[in-house]
Every structure is written in structure tokens, then in C-alpha cells.
Image: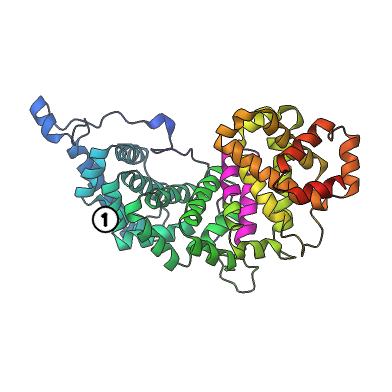
Amino acid sequence: MENNTDDAEQKEENSSSPVMDRNPSPPPEAADGLETEDVDAIGDTVYSKHWLFSTLTRLIHMVTDLSEENPEAQMKLSDDDEEDLCKVWDMAMDKDVARFLQEFKAADILLGVISKSRCPRLTEICVGILGNMACFPDTCVTLSQKEDLCAVLLLLLGDADPPTLLETSRLLLTCLSHKDVCSLWLQRIRQQTSVCPNLCFIMCSSTNTDLLEKVGDLVDKLFDLDEELMKSWITAKPHNKKGDESDTPLDLTSCLLEAVKQLRSEKLNGIEIYLHIFQLITTVEEGLENFAAPNGPGKALWDFVCDIVCEDLCQQNDLEVALHEQKSTLVQAFAVLQALYRCQDQWRSRADPSTDLIWIILRLCQHHSENTEGASDEQLQALFEIASEFLADLCIHIPKEAVLDLVNKGYLTAEICVAAATSLLPTYKTSVSASFT
């Protein structure tokens, strides 16, 4: 399928319609008089049942008529139709409306519209309505039990429209977050073999940062829930959407790396999500083997994460600030770096850490020794423990040239040496002995 993801307009992620200036006023009243309004109102809201019936009925007729006239023609919503459907999208975020839509069989109606739709904006809105309905446990369970609907939603991950992909990813992530239907969705995703290659294709080809961040959330959730699924995706080599066996296969970890590179300049939160995915991958043998391969993505990922740590997260003048503002991202980054450092024997070029990276690790140890209150902060404590273990690995292999460079730059002072030794002893006595030797 031809990829149009780079050219599409980015949509602002929101639990409601992405158009910020289209927050709906209450729909038209069905009739005059308080009693009639009470009968027509949906639950405790001011939204009108009659208006919602009319809008959905009009939607059915519109799609049916257009598909019968010319099934292959591209549809375009009128401004009035789009505005009304966006009102429904926003209304679906209300619990009473979501339940009413469920009772009205709106899911079946929207499935029919999605199946016949030749309008990307219409498909996006329909999936967005379903996504808002799925935010509530009871409606989520009902939606998740509809086999045909769920199959279509998984296939929509192969769509070419970025806003539709964004809403589809949001809906799937919402369903996976509900414990009552999580296992059901995991089973379907395992069975639908197109999910992995479609997600890989998005990550390696899209420049839509909102979409890449949401797809990262989805992959992170899947891997956190299902280790076996993660292993199968790591070892799979799906081909691109053209299905040509001669095409270069898509490697999951390489696609993840392309996505996080795209996010670097705009979405720091997105970087943390992808770093956590990489950290999860390093916890299984299949992931370590992938990173250790001579032609694998391990060295490229090492270089990228080192740049992130040294240039974006921990510049020399703001380490104290970084420790408090970026500590969760740093935990993921150092966990990934340590795992990569340990599996580099087969790489074509060795990943010797830069003096800037070593200095940052030493400063982390010094900060911990000078600030005992950090022990009560779980993330800071986890960061210190990872940094200490990583420093122990580095001490055994650090070249003399690197030590001299640290001294010449003024990074390796007596105070820092004492702090580093204190952080390593007594657990890493061998590493301390090697470093002093």
C-alpha cells in the first residue's frame, strides 16, 4: 500500500475531537417544554436522543447512497455533516451517551460505515467515537465481544491515513488497558499476523510525531503484557506492505530506532516510551541476540542513546536539574546502555563510552553520596543502582587513554574518585581494584 503518512496533517491527540475549536454546544432541542426535554434527554445530560437518532440515520443513508452510486469514488463530508459527527464524537466521551450509543447498536452502525467508507475523515471520526465509547468498562466489554468489529479495527492498522491510524491505535490501547478484555485482545493480536508488519511500517516510514508516540504506547503496552508476543515479534522478519519477497524485511528493533529518532526533537515523552520498549527487549534472550548480532541495530542504538544522554538529558551545567526532571528517562536510558555494553563482542566496532558519558556516571555517583535524601526517591535510587553497576562494568574495561582524557578535562577529581569508590564498595570490589590498578 502506498504510504501517505508523511503528507497528512497531524492531529492533536485528545480524548475528544482533534479540532479544538469545535467543542459542541448542546444539540438542538427536540421540542418545547421541560417535560418533553426530560424525555428526550440522554440520561442526566442535555443531549437529545432525537438529534442523535437523526444524525446516525442520516449517516447510514449518506454512506449507503454514495457507495451505491460509485463504490470506488472518494467521498468528502460536507461541513455540516462533519460538524454534526464531531459533536457525536465529543458526546461519546459522556458515560450516559456512550451507554445510549451502545443500546442503540451504534457500534454495528459505525462498523458498517467504516466498511463502506471512502472518506478518510469519516473513518477517523467513526473510530474516534468507538474509542471514546471504549473508555468506559461496560461499553468496552460490549465492543470487544464483537468479532467482526475487532477484526476490522486490527486491519485498519494497515490504513494509509495518519489520523485514522492515530485513533485506531488509541482505541486498541484503551481496550488493552481494561483488564476484563485485555486477554481477549492479546489473543486476537497474536492471531492477526498483519499487526506486527503494519506497526513496523508506520514506525519506519511516518514523520507524524503524534502517531509515532501513540504507536510506541501501543507496542510498549503489548510487550509489557505479553512477553511471548514480544519474543515472536523480535524474531519475525515481516516484509513491507507490498508483499514482495525480494523486498528487505522489516526488523522490529530497527523500526523502533527509526521512530525514536524522528521523535527526538519534538517529543521527549515519546523518547522515554521507546527507551522502555528497548529496555523490555533487553530482558529476553531473543532481544539480546538481536542487539549482539554483527549486522544488528545494537551499535546504532548505543550511539543514539549515548547522544540522548550526553546532549539532550545531561548537559554539564544542568545535571542537578536533569536528575529531577528527567530521572525516569535516564533510568531507561542507562538500563539500555548497560545491556548493550555487555553484548557488543560481535559488533564490528567496539562501543567505548565517551568521556562525557563516563563523567555523567561519575557525577551520578557523587550526587548520590552527597545527597542521602535521594534514597527515599525510588526512581533516583534505581538510577543510582543502574549507574553503579554500569560503572563497575566500565572500570574493568576502560582504556588508559579514556582515564587520561578524564583527568585532562578536569572530570576525574579526588572527590569524584572517592564518591565512585564509595558507590562501588563493597559490592563491586573487583571493579574498584581494576580501576585503581
Q: Residue at x 32, y 41 (%)?
A: 85
Q: Is 293 within the magenta?
A: no
Please, what is the dominant secondary structure of the magenta stretch?
helix
Q: Position of residue 259 (x, y in %)?
A: 61, 50
Q: Residue at x 74, y 34 (%)?
A: 363
Which one is nearer the viewer's eye here, 142 or 220?
220
Q: Position of residue 44 (x, y in %)?
A: 19, 32
Q: Position of residue 29 (x, y in %)?
A: 18, 30
Which one is nearer the viewer's eye here, 428 or 366?
428
Name the residue that disc number 1 marks: 108
| Residue most extreme to the bottom | 245
- Residue 33 in view here: no
* Callout 1 amino acid: Asp
| Residue most extreme to the left | 35
Q: Is 258 within the magenta?
A: yes
Q: Is residue 10 above or below residue 338?
A: above
Count of numbered circles on the image: 1
Question: What is the quadrant of residue 313 in the picture?
Answer: top right
Q: Is residue 81 above or below residue 116?
A: above
In the figure, is residue 28 to the left or right of 226? Answer: left
Q: Which residues are the magenta region?
A: 252-276
Label 1: how many Cα within 10 Å (few below 14, some 14–19, many 20+)? some
Q: Residue at x 59, y 58 (%)?
A: 283
- Residue 344 in view here: yes
| Residue most extreme to the top | 33
Looking at the rendered structure, the secondary structure element under dot 1 is: helix
Q: Position of residue 137 (x, y in %)?
A: 29, 47
In the rendered view, how is the structure colored? rainbow
Which one is nearer the viewer's eye here, 338 or 239?
338
Which one is nearer the viewer's eye here, 19 or 304?
304
Question: What is the quadrant of residue 372 in the picture?
Answer: top right
